[in-house]
Image (cartoon, rainbow, N blue to C red):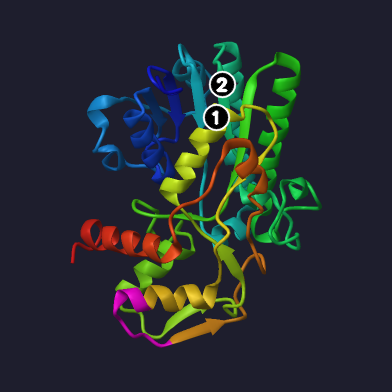
Amino acid sequence: MSFWQRKNVLVTGGAGFIGSHLIEMLVQAGSLVRVADNLINGKLDNLKSCIDKIEFVNVDLNQFENCLKVTKDTDIVLNLVAKVAGIDFNKKHSGTMFYKNVLPNLSVLEAARINEAERFLVVSSACVYPRYCTIPTPETEGFKEDPEPSNFGYGWAKRVLEIQAKAYSDEFDMKIGIVRPYNSYGPRDHFDETIAHVIPALIRRVFAGEDPLNVWGDGEQTRAFIYVKDLAQGMMLAAEKYPVPDPLNIGTEEEIKIKDLVKLIVEISGLKPKIIFDSTKPAGQPRRNADITKAQQKIGFKANTALKQGLNETIQWYLNNVIKR
């Protein structure tokens, strides 16, 4: 029997982009899944492949009483509840991003403690890292200086949650794991212009026919994008094999410059817009890439989806489900 077979698993924020893929894997592994989501960022349509196999609760996790209700009778809590946005919103609304990410997450872990959940997974972020960090970045730099300025509030919120995990593990002997996901992408991503991250934003704009295609930054900044299914697998491995408050980077070693990413998306699209880079606009960290040595050692994690393959699948999903070309 697998570790996940017949486990009562709560996934908060589970109707979202990442959560929906995670839930499909949990159902396939034989878990009894409860999903708690207020459907502000998520959609029930994301769960259509398994909606008849799960319990869905439409709930506001900013209210502590609701956190107590949804964590009752759970073996494992995978806490994905989050306020997400694009770089422009993050930069202008650091207070909002801090508050709206700290409040529900603090409450969910406290409720899980009261209800004696066996295990808990804190989903932190690569946004905890400072602007100028070692590349590839080891977990030891997670509290070095302030987080990257364009993610200041969000990054500090995630740091607070990691501190809570360590404190609760120390005092209450809880089994709590921490993952720091890197930039993810894939089918069901957020393509809305107000919250889309770089890959879905570029896909939407390319297929909207923007010409010229204006890209923020000079294009020299780099990222290492992890396909959503690989990320979900990393989360499950962390909860199963390393439930200790010692963060694990979940990412890929395939680093790419943004200018090359843009060219790759355009190439796959078959369209030929003129590409213009605007260096007067914010571009975030100069480089971002994970040192995944510890995740490989502790949980046997490795991302298996190459960027070009993942982009092809993401674009095909976008064509079939969003613009239905």
Instruction: Say what secondary structure mark 1 lies in.
Output: helix
List x then y, in percent, for residue 194. 44, 59
Residue 239 has which mark? 1
Q: Main secondary structure of the magenta part?
A: loop
Query: Circle 1: is it few (<14), some (14-19), or many (20+) Cα within 10 Å?
Result: many
Q: Is residue 309 magenta?
A: no
What amino acid is found at the position of numbered circle 2 in the picture?
A: Arg
Q: Which residue is at the far bottom?
A: 274
Whether residues under marks 1 and 2 lie with C-beta atoms below 8 angstroms apart, the answer is: yes
Extent of the magenta region: 267-274
Residue 119 has which mark? 2
List x then y, in percent, for residue 58. 36, 28
273 and 120: which is toward the camera: 120
The quadrant in which residue 43 appears is top left
Q: Which residue is at the far right?
A: 145
225, above or below 180, in the image: below
Q: Please state if 160 lies on the left or on the right of 321 as rendered.
A: right
What is the quadrant of the N terminus in the image?
Answer: top left
- Seen at 29% across and 38% down, the residue is 47
Q: Is residue 169 visible?
A: yes
Instruction: Say what secondary structure mark 2 lies in.
Output: strand
